[in-house]
Amino acid sequence: MLEITCNDRLGKKVRVKCNPDDTIGDLKKLIAAQTGTRADKIVLKKWYTIFKDHIKIEDYEIHDGQNLELYYQ
Amino acid sequence: MGSSKKHKEKDREDKKRKKGSDSSKKRRHNRSRSGSPSPTDDYSHRRSRSRSTSPAARSSRKRQKEKRRHSGSDDSDVPIAKSSRYAETKPESRSPSPPPKASSGDNSSLSIVETNKLRAKLGLKPLQVESAPSRAPPPPKVQVRQDEIEEGEHVDFDEETLMKIRDEREQEAETFWKEKQDFVHAPAENLTEKIKVEKLREKIALRREKRRLEAKLAESKGLADSDSDDDAAAWVRKQKETVQQKLLAEKKAKELDELDNEFGVGELVETEFVKQKNKAYTDRDLKGLKVLHGQDRIQEGNTVILTLKDKDVLNEEDDVLVNPNMIDDEKFEKNLENRKLRPEYNGYNVFDEIEYDSDGNLKGKGVLGKYDEEIEGKKSKGSFVIGEDTSEEARRAKIREKMLRSDKILESAESTSLRIASDFFTPDEMVKFKKPGKKKVRKVRKVLKADDLLHIDAESHPAPVGVISQKDLGSRKSKKSSGSVDIDPKTEPVDMEIDLEVDDLPPVQDIDVSDIKLEDEGDLDFQVALQKARLLKQKENLKKPRGVNIEDLLRSDDNPDQSSSGSIVLHATAEFCRTLGDIPRIEGADIYGDEEMDFEREDKKSQIEERGTWNEVEIDETPVDITRPADAEESTILELEPDVAVGIAGALKVAMTKGYLDKDMQRRGGPSKMRHLQAQHYSIEDKSYEDDKFGKRDDRFISGPIMEFSEKNHYKPDFKLEYTDDDGKPISAKEAFRILSHKFHGKGSGKNKVDKKRRKVDQEKLLQHMNSTDTPLNTLELLQQRQKETHSAYVVLTGNKTAGASLSKSKH
């Protein structure tokens, strides 16, 4: 299990617990459940890399405590 | 990281400030340690202090800690965080738990349990937590902790009770998760899967349909499919059948023939057949049908197969016969034609022949006739109608007839008789000939001509009798003849005298002035010389018989105003001198130039010896007198004082230098005063009129109405430029320029120069006012004074100071 912090710098900051073998899509669903934003409107980014839904968190080498940028589309 | 820590601290402090006065002590403490570098230190300190503080303060701290835990920036590893949390729970169990949702304002985080619940709802597998079986013991643990927090009213626990409670909780959790086991994951329907299935279904349907159609097609026979007569035996059988059928048919025909013969039908048929043959297909049948090819294409004796040309169904035109081979030929020829370089694109072609069309009509050539073919389509060059007389001979005859009818073009080449060319026009040609318009007579500006003079003088002075007629002044040849013929020695003497006496009058009357070439100066000079020579000759001839006073002659010749020929000679030099009329004449100067006078004198000296046009230059052979003293001007360096005793001129000069007389007086009113003496009818001939026609070119640039420039003939201004300096003293132009220059450059002359100038002016002034018998510095007067004083006839000029002082300038 790992915890990821997602922050849009507009007032929403969530910490999400997830499994490393979850996909980014799953993560988005979790974020959606916590923030109330629809999952398909969420974009996750780290610097300029937009994370794709079908790829697992561990494949992106996202580790525990990492911060992701939360954007909306 | 550090900065975020700082932020958190600030947050904390804000919270604390909000708390109120009860935590003031602690705040003070915090403030005192605000500069502490390590947060861990701070943390530990707070922890150690937390036990001794009041419950309220403790609870507040508890909340902070809770918050800290949730922020999670310090604990990245979950198990570690858990253990630390367990460690913390012991002392903080008393404090009330914060509301779980309080922290989810801007940094929301769910517990694992909650997350698991959520995950279950979303169809995800539960979180896998390390150091636990797959069923995730950590959630129960967390559960325990949460329960604990919720029941936070216990005051104190010892180890055993704690353990007991934990076991209890664990068991509870176990049961909870067992219950949870019943959860059936309803997997979210996979869209891709769905689509895949849909696609597969479609594919299968397609396949099925295809198979059905194939089966249908298989029933019908294809072209290549073998027939039933594949085998040879069947084929043979078939052939046999056909042969048999043929035989049968023949038999039947024979039978029928026999029957016909019996009834006489055969003859009938035959006669019919012959009739058909008689109706041979000739050109009569095709009469009126048009063939689209020229007749020359169809060679005699050859058979050409003509077909009806294709045409539209709806086309109402008549049928036309063509031969495809010939069409190809025509196309080929046309291509060849196109490939040639055609001259018609070069505009007018001189050698272009007049073209006639097939009927002999003149073919009018349009301007862009070459494009007619493209626009209107090619005219069928040779097309004929079957049945008409189309032979070449007939065509020619037709043309001839047409020409005759119109008699347009028929012309014989011998229509014009040959004539000898002549340089002159025949009378009727003259009628036709248009005379060139009279050339516009150019108006010459009014020039003083001899005619004008004649008109003036003719009234008062009747012409002298024996004046040489100079009608033919213009031509050299005739001149000579006149010189030899006209002058009759017998008549001459009279006129000579008259000539000499009436010299001032303009004597010549019958000169055709228009013949005189005024411009030709060289010619004129020559004429003048000739005339003089002739006159002198005459004089020589006259000298002996009549005894005319030669001295008188010479004297009269010396007179500059006399013109020796007795006629007015106009030439450039004279005119130039005339224009200089304002210039004061020097006594005895020759207005006609020196050369002429020299020439005359020379003539006199050489005792009138004509040498044609050539004249010798006399060498001055008088010996130079070396003994003669050098000129006075050369010897004196200083200007001599004019001698007053000689005459008035000298006195005047002296007066001028001494300033008694104004220098500029004599210049006053020079030209205007003498105006009445100037020539009345004098004007300068415009010699540049030759350039007028070229000059006109310039007119277009200055065309347009411009005010005519009227010369002010009578305006002769009398002016004098005078400059004065600051004191009002007149100065020279040079001086004035210097002053102007100084003003312009803003820089005057130096002090020395100014002084010098001033001194000079002073000196001049002194000179003007000095006694004429004294020096400018009145030295003489001083000297005399001194002599008077000392009563001696001398003055001592020593370097002695006392003596020098006595001779100092007296002030007056």
Image: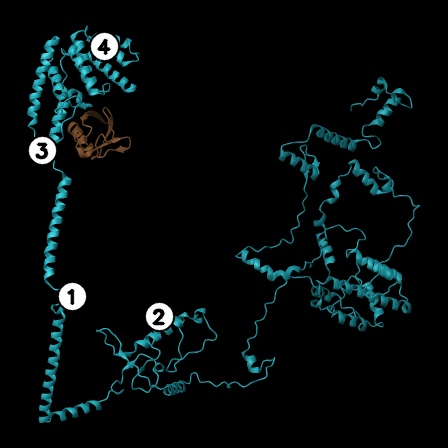
**Real-space Cα separation, disc 1 to disc 4, in angstroms:** 102 Å
Residue B221 shown left or right of residue B579 in the figure: left
Question: Which of the colour schemes (rainbow, by chain, secondary structure, one colour) is used?
Answer: by chain
**Viewer-nearest of labels 1 and 3?**
1
The image quadrant of residue B661 is: top right
Q: Residues within 10 Å of mark 1 (few under 14, many from 20)?
A: few
Which chain is indicated by disc 2? B
Q: Earlier in the sequence, mark 1 or mark 3?
A: 3
Q: Amino acid at mark 1?
A: Leu
Q: Are marks 1 and 3 on the same chain?
A: yes
Task: Tell me if label 4 and label 3 are in contact, CB under 8 Å.
Answer: no
Q: In the rendered image, which residue does mark 2 sit on?
A: B374
Name the foreground residue: B354 vs B297.
B297
Q: Secondary structure at mark 3?
A: loop
Q: Secondary structure at mark 4?
A: helix
**Colour cyan maps to chain:** B
Which chain is indicated by disc 3? B
In this picture, is B695 found above or below B93? below
Residue B749 place in picture, x, y as percent: 68, 31
Which chain is indicated by disc 1? B
Task: Tell me if label 1 and label 4 are in contact, CB under 8 Å.
Answer: no
Q: Are marks 2 and 4 on the same chain?
A: yes
Residue A65 place in picture, x, y as percent: 23, 24
Q: In the rendered image, which residue does mark 4 sit on?
A: B46
Residue A36 place in picture, x, y as percent: 16, 29
According to the rendering, which colour does chain A have? brown
Q: Amino acid at mark 4?
A: Arg
Identity of the residue furthest to the top in this view: B52
